Amino acid sequence: MTNVTRRQFLQKSTMAAAGAAAAVTFPSVTGQAQSKFTINVGLIGCGGRGSGALSNVLEAGKVAGVTVRVVALADAFQDRLENARARYRKMGVDVPASRCFHGFDAYRKLVSIPEINYVMMATPPGFRPWHFEEAIRHGKNVFMEKPVGVDGPGIRRVFAAADEATRKGLSVVAGTQRRHQKGYIETIKRIQDGAIGEIKALRAYWNGGAIWHRGGDPNTIEGQLRNWYHYVWFCGDHIVEQHVHNLDVCNWIMGAHPIRAYGQGGRQALGPNVTGMKWDHFAVEYEYPNGVRMFSQCRQISRTDSRVSEAATGTKGESNPGGSIVTADGKRWRFRGRALNPYVQEHVDLINAIRSGKPVNEGRQVAESTLTAILGRESAYSGKIISWDQMLNSKRELMPKELNSDMAEELKWKITAPKPVVPIPGIYKFA
């Protein structure tokens, strides 16, 4: 499954460390002289996704023919930070202790380092609006994992920061890697050029197995954060954290976001020992401005049939936008070109944008796709039809504000953890 490979190290070769930060230099694929252009990376979030993304950007340096230096690391947990340093050291990436920060304010220390020009964000998505806003304030180019928030107020902050990035000429790329995958790019171009006629309906699926749960005390911030996927304020629920990929593809095809959603779902297979509040299945009908419906399913239940895909039906045929089209007269087209790993390609594209001085900014599009997922979640939780404007203007903030305050770091860990209550349609109130 794609979400597994994102968390694996792709870079296997030994790389030499140099200076106060790890300097990794690759020859260009053309064999020409190494570019003097340097990417100075700061990584926020050293878990599985952060480690995978770090490996990806190092591989992207090889493809783009640039020097990649890992300058600083940040994570909420000191133990995870140290474990990550040990893993990176085996790759030849040795970041000094003076450039490794832990705690909820670690991201502020990292983005304030002047030489960093490439901030990577891979923390739980509830933190993303804060981190993105601060990085742009400090004039940093950003690679941020999807999704980019968990509620309406957070998404509004991402919109504002993305607009500020445009004003400052900064580049922003998101971890919606299908946007950088040649099969998707070529197929969706054909769809938008009319290959299957007028779009009449869309389908989106991420049906897979149950997600991890690590145990621990669910009544503390630490216990909840170590199981962040099970708490809506950190994760957004799996329709937001995972299914956003497929929803993003549908928005891409339509060149628009939905105007309303009507959803349902529940928490049926998660046992009593799995603490938290997340649901394990959703089914949502989205409506786009022209009346086209998109039917969405996502599930995290073990021992069930898996499906991770999208489909578009038009007046002249149907497409799997990942690489195939079948027209009504029986003609078939399939993408057969060669392509770079899209998890590497997205970093190559960001590096090239920075180096060329021609900024790219995916901040708004990933924020819209994230809000699409949040809209579906809130409709399903409440059992109500909810509009895009209602969701965007929602006043409900899920993340504990104390975690981004000037409160002493040791006190942040001791704040009263939010009480998880499983949403029940008809009882849960959208706000």
Image (tube, rainbow, N blue to C red):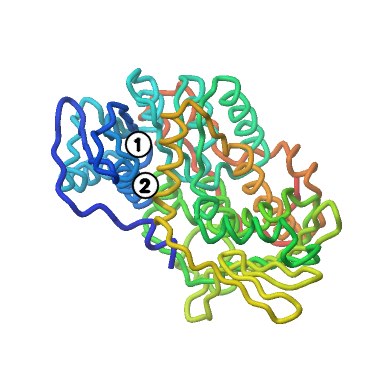
| Nearest the eye: 241 or 331 | 331
Quarter of image, res 261: bottom right
Q: Mark 2 touching mark 1, by CB under 8 A?
A: yes
Mark 2, Cα crowd under 10 Å, few <14 / some 14-19 / many 20+, is: many
Quarter of image, res 1: bottom left
- x and y, in percent, of residue 227 in the image: 42, 54
Quarter of image, res 154: top right
The C terminus lies in quadrant: top right
The residue positioned 72% from the left and 57% from the top of the image is 193
Q: Identify residue type, mark 1.
A: Leu
- Circle 2 SS class: helix
The residue positioned 25% from the left and 27% from the top of the image is 99
Q: Is residue 264 at least partly visible in the picture? A: no
| Nearest the eye: 181 or 241 | 181
Q: Is residue 120 left or right of residue 125?
A: left
| Nearest the eye: 95 or 68 | 68
Q: Identify residue type, mark 2.
A: Ala
Q: Is residue 340 at least partly visible in the picture? A: yes
| Nearest the eye: 174 or 344 | 344
- x and y, in percent, of residue 228 in the image: 46, 51
Report the disc number at residue 190.
Answer: none
- Circle 1 SS class: strand
Residue at the outermost right position: 291
**Which residue is labeled 2 in the image?**
53
> Which mark is in front, 2 or 1?
2
- x and y, in percent, of residue 390 in the image: 79, 43
The residue positioned 40% from the left and 55% from the top of the image is 340
**Which residue is labeled 1 in the image?**
43
156 relative to 332, above or below: above
Q: Is residue 317 left or right of residue 33?
A: right
- x and y, in percent, of residue 108 in the image: 41, 24
